[in-house]
Image (tube, grey):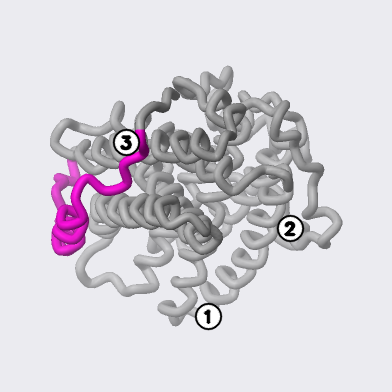
């Protein structure tokens, strides 16, 4: 990542205003259902998660900055994260409904369907990350999450087997089996807090993986909380409330891994890398007709990364700039998702 010249926040303030006036067009549905496969839906859900989390990061940064130009940069970047979230979300929200639900299905049916999609997205991502994670404590946490989410997905799918066609969601990538029993997932505070990594020694890949899964766990928690406001099925309400309690522990556990000395600007850089990593993988899966939201987000997130590097340069944080990688390769796990999950569950039996 190189820096140079004066940081430019807005090319034109009027352009920024016009972009806001176009916000209604961001939600335009531009896909055809046949162009999607399950892996791309996973990536789109993860894309929504990292974009939403990064928006929160920028809001926090803006609130703490006392330099007006830097504050404007954070606000502008945050605005564009919201744009990315809506555009990518517009790809998947109508799709998830149309994939296997009819117009006569109830909101409860929709919520049951969507939770299996969410669980599958995090199961597949964590199963890949855990296999290649070199930091042992981080790997142990990823395995812990995976065992919990396997149970969540299995319970939901089993309880509502007559209403959900799970095969269309799982798509042969793994088979449903319970991991850690739900009653054993209720952890005390001491077991939630883990030893944090050393920010100067841990690999950037580890930081990006942790950030990605924090984003996804936070997103899933918020979705379950929103579903509770809408659903009427008492069994489902009880189950979702229980899962919310577990998800809250997951978020706390992952956050405890982050070095408390890590500057907020460094966390924002990690967030941009997590977005870029996800959108790059999404573009490889997307048909040319539907790659635009991922491609646009990818390009603008690269610009955000440069802006953050410029801010770090202005603040004299050279070591932070030097730690920004040219690229983060996709994981190359030795086992299939199903193979890893099966071995993990057997080892914890």
Q: CA distance from mark 2 to mark 3?
A: 36 Å
Q: In the rendered image, which quarter contains the N terminus?
A: top left
Q: Residues within 10 Å of mark 1 (few under 14, many from 20)?
A: few
Is-magenta flag for residue 273? Answer: no
Mark 3 or mark 1, earlier in chain? 1
In the current view of this chain or complex, which residue is farthest to the right? 190
Residue 315 visible in the displayed image: yes
- Residue 308, how many percent across, how many down? 45, 40
Question: Mark 3 = which residue?
Answer: 298
Q: CA distance from mark 2 to mark 1?
A: 21 Å
Question: Mark 1 = which residue?
Answer: 234
Nearest the eye: 23 or 279:
23
Is residue 81 shown above or below 276? below
Give the left or right position of residue 190, taking residue 230 as reference. Answer: right
**Magenta residue span:** 6-34
Give the left or right position of residue 12, taking residue 135 as reference. Answer: left
- Asked if the residues shown at circle 3 and circle 1 are in contact, with their CB atoms under 8 angstroms apart, the answer is no
Is residue 341 shown above or below 16? above
């Amino acid at each position: 990542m190189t820096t140079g010249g004066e940081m430019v926040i807005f090319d034109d303030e009027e352009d920024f205003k016009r972009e806001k006036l176009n916000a209604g067009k961001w939600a335009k549905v531009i896909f055809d259902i046949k162009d999607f496969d399950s892996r791309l839906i996973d990536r789109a859900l993860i894309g929504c998660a990292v974009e939403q989390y990064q928006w929160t990061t920028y809001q926090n940064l803006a609130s703490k900055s006392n330099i007006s130009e830097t504050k404007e940069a954070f606000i502008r970047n945050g605005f564009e994260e919201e744009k990315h979230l809506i555009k990518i979300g517009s790809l998947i929200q109508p799709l998830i409904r149309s994939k296997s639900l009819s117009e006569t299905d109830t909101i409860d049916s929709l919520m049951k369907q969507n939770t299996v999609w969410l669980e599958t997205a995090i199961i597949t991502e964590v199963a890949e990350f855990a296999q290649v994670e070199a930091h042992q404590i981080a790997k142990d946490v990823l395995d812990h999450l995976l065992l919990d989410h396997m149970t969540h997905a299995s319970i939901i799918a089993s309880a509502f087997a007559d209403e959900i066609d799970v095969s269309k969601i799982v798509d042969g990538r793994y088979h449903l089996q319970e991991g850690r029993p739900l009653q054993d997932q209720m952890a005390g505070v001491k077991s939630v807090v883990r030893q944090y990594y050393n920010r100067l020694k841990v690999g950037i890949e580890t930081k990006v993986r942790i950030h990605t899964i924090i984003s996804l766990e936070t997103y899933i928690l918020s979705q379950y909380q929103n579903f509770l406001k809408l659903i009427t099925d008492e069994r489902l309400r009880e189950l979702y409330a229980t899962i919310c309690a577990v998800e809250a522990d997951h978020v706390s556990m992952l956050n405890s891994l982050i070095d408390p000395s890590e500057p907020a600007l460094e966390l924002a850089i990690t967030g941009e890398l997590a977005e870029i990593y996800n959108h790059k993988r999404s573009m490889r899966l997307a048909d040319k007709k539907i790659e635009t939201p991922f491609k646009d987000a990818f390009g603008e997130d690269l610009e955000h990364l440069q802006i953050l590097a410029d801010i770090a340069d202005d603040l004299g944080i050279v070591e932070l700039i030097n730690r920004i990688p040219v690229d983060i390769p996709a994981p190359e796990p030795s086992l299939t998702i199903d193979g890893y999950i099966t071995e993990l569950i057997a080892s914890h039996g």
